[in-house]
Image (cartoon, helix red, strand yellow):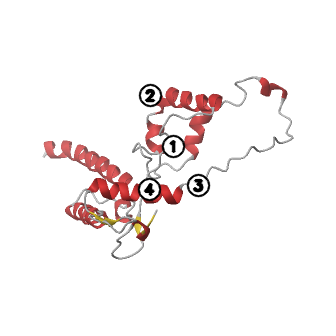
Amino acid sequence: HTLESSLTPRYEQTLSKLNQFYKQRSKKGWATSGDHNTKFFHQAVIKRRKRNTICSIKDENDVLHFKPSAITNTFVNYFRYIFSSPNNNTARPFLNTRLPDNSLDPTYFLPDKHEILQILKDMKLNASPGPDGFNVEFYLAAWDWIGEEVTQLVTTFYKTGILPPRINDTNIAIIPKKLVPQVPMDYHP
């Protein structure tokens, strides 16, 4: 009896951690209420995965593709085309704005570590994660370890205007517009 009573809290804690893991990966209402890793939960995940798997797609030349790499390329080409725009960057005239006298100091506009942390705290904690797989909740939990690097990244951007390659990549979830989608146009991002 004592072994069972001593292991029960550890079991509940493990279930809670698993539940939190799946909750972060799922936007289902039943995950919020706490499913505790049941058979129903796993069947729902498997069913959803099957429903969301794209087995074939037609490209712009009406060629049907079945290989995952060809399906991926078809979508990438389609969305690259619709999300690209001609470069119409024209020089904008400077505004007649008077900057404070201390703005000549190169560090005047640089956010510090505390300001960046406050911005993170003001964001939605469990929003969908970015391409790196981490949401704001992770960055806050790991701030003691990664705060300096994040601050350096932000201040370097403020100084140079340059972001590291691929840092602004975005995952696009595509949702079918039709019951049986056949071409990329049958999906919306």
User: Which is more foreground, mark 2 or mark 1?
Assistant: 1
* Residue underneath mark 3: 85
Structural distance between the alpha carbons of marks 2 and 4: 29 Å
For residue 83, above or below residue 183:
above
For residue 179, above or below residue 108:
below
For residue 154, above or below residue 81:
above
- Using the image as rendered, state which of residue 141 and residue 51 is in the foreground: 51
157 relative position to 102: left or right: left
- Residue at the far top in the pictured view: 105
**Image spot of residue 68 (x, y percent):** 27, 56
* Residue underneath mark 1: 168
* Residue underneath mark 4: 172
170 relative position to 112: left or right: left
Type of the residue with mark 3: Ser
**Image spot of residue 33 (x, y percent):** 36, 61
Q: Badge 4: few (under 14), some or many (20 or more) residues near its Cα, within 10 Å?
A: few
Structural distance between the alpha carbons of marks 2 and 3: 39 Å
Q: Give the structural element (helix, strand or loop) at label 4.
A: loop
